[in-house]
Amino acid sequence: MAPHNPSRKPASANGDGIAARLLAWYDAHHRELPWRVAPRDLASGTKPDPYRVWLSEVMLQQTTVEAVKSYFAAFTAKWPTVSALASADTDDVMKAWAGLGYYSRARNLKACANFIAGNGGQFPDSEEGLRALPGVGPYTAAAIAAIAFNRPAAVVDGNVERVITRLFSIATPLPQAKGEIRLHVERMVPSERPGDFAQAMMDHGATICTPRKPKCMLCPLRADCSAIRAGDPEFYPVRLAKPAKPLRRGAAFVAVRKDGAILLRKRPDKGLLGGMSEVPTTGWTARVDGETSAQAAPFVAAWQRAGSISHVFTHFALELDIYRAEADGETPSGCFWSHPAEISGEALPTVMKKAIEAAIPGATRKQRH
C-alpha cells in the first residue's frame, strides 16, 4: 500500500478545471430528484423554488434520499408553499413527519415556516440571512443559498467530505479535517452555476465516489485524484473510532380497549422525541434506565409480557420490555385513545411503532378501506 501523505496534491490542483469536469459529468449523469431543477430546465429559465429546496435539505439531514422521497411528496402535496405549512397545525406536521426521525427537525421546520410567513413570506437569498432562520445551520444555509439562489457558497455534506479527502489525500481525521475540506471546496466553487456544482459534488459522492467500492474507472475526476494514484481511495475519509453507545432499558405498556383503540399520550415538546405520541413508558432517558417490570405500569390491569424491542438512537441504544393489557376504556390523565383506523396516522416515532407492533402485530400499518 502506498504511504498516505496528507500533503500530497492531486495530479491537477486547478479548482476551475475540477469544477468544469464535474459539471460536464453532472449535465449527463445527474440524479432526477423530486425537489431538484435539472440542468436542462435551469438552462431554459426554470427557477428553483426556495421552499422545496429548504424542505428537502431539512428532510435529508441524517436521512437517505430514498427515505425522503415519499415524505417530500406527501408534505408538498399537503402544504405546497411555506405559507401553507405555516398555517398547518403543529400536531399535523408532527404526524406527517412520523417515522422520518430526528424530530427536532420537524419542530424547527414549523418554527421556520411561521417565521418566514410572519416576515413577508419570502426566504432570505444570502447565507447570512438564511442562517438567521430558526433551525437553519451553516450547511443548510449554504445549500439553500447555492441551489435556490445560485450564490457561490461552499456546500459540504458527508458526500463532499469523502470526495475532497480522496482528491487531496487529507489524512486528518474527521471532524478535525472539516476546516481544511471547506477551504478546498471554497477554492473550487465556480462563479457560474454554483448551485449545480454543489449538487454535482453530492451526486458524485453518492453514485461514484461511494464509501465502499468507489467506481473510480467511471470517475470524471480520476486524473485529479491523489487517492487513486496512491492506490487506496477507501482509506479516506479517516475517522476516529467511535465509543460504544450506552445501552438503556425500560418498559412500554400497550393498553387496548374493547373496540381496538390504543392508549397514547403526547411527549413533552422539548427533549428526545419531543411533541411526538407514545404508549406509556417508564422513565428511561439517554442517561438513565427506566423500570422494566409490570409493576411500573400506568394503571392496574392484567398486564402480560409481549416480548421486547430494540432501537438505536444517535447517542444510545434502547431495549424496552413490552406489556399488553385489555383496558376498561377509562382515560388516564394526560392520555387519549386512538382508534385502529387512526393509529397509523398518529405522530408515532419508529420506536413506538415497534412497541405497538410487538403487542399487536399489524396495528400501525395503514388500514385498507
Image: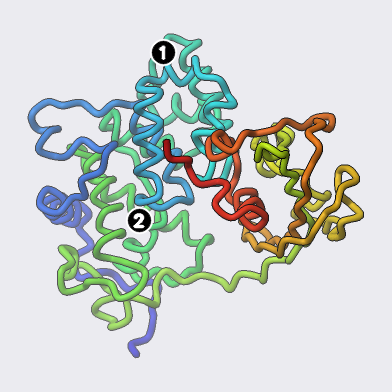
Please say which color scheme the image uses: rainbow
Which one is earlier in the sequence, the residue at label 1 or at label 2?
Answer: 1
Category of crowding for the residue at label 1, using alpha-carbon neighbours closer than 10 angstroms: few (below 14), some (14–19), many (at least 20): some
Nearer to us in this view, 245 or 2: 245
Q: Position of residue 299 (x, y in %)?
A: 88, 43
Q: Position of residue 247 (x, y in %)?
A: 73, 66
Q: Amino acid at mark 2?
A: Val
Q: Position of residue 325 (x, y in %)?
A: 78, 50
Category of crowding for the residue at label 2, using alpha-carbon neighbours closer than 10 angstroms: few (below 14), some (14–19), many (at least 20): many
Q: Position of residue 102 (x, y in %)?
A: 57, 45
CB under 8 Å between discs 1 and 2? no
Q: Examine the rendered structure and indicate whether residue 298 appears above or below residue 312.
A: above
Left or right of 190: which side holds 282? right
Question: Which image quarter is the C terminus in?
Answer: top left
**Which element type, helix, strand or loop, lies under badge 2?**
helix
Residue receiving disc 1? 121
Q: Examine the rendered structure and indicate whether residue 282 appears above or below residue 7.
A: above
Q: Residue at x 75, y 53 (%)?
A: 324
Q: Amino acid at mark 1?
A: Gly
Residue receiving disc 2? 160
Quadrant of residue 22 within the rendered picture: bottom left
Q: Nearer the viewer, mark 1 or mark 2?
A: 1
Nearer to us in this view, 237 or 7: 237
Q: Residue at x 21, y 73 (%)?
A: 216
Number of marks drawn: 2
**Which element type, helix, strand or loop, lies under badge 1?**
loop
Cα distance in 3D space between marks 1 and 2: 31 Å
Nearer to us in this view, 129 or 298: 298
Nearer to us in this view, 183 or 279: 279
Q: Residue at x 39, y 45 (%)?
A: 68
Q: Examine the rendered structure and indicate whether residue 11 appears above or below residue 47.
A: below
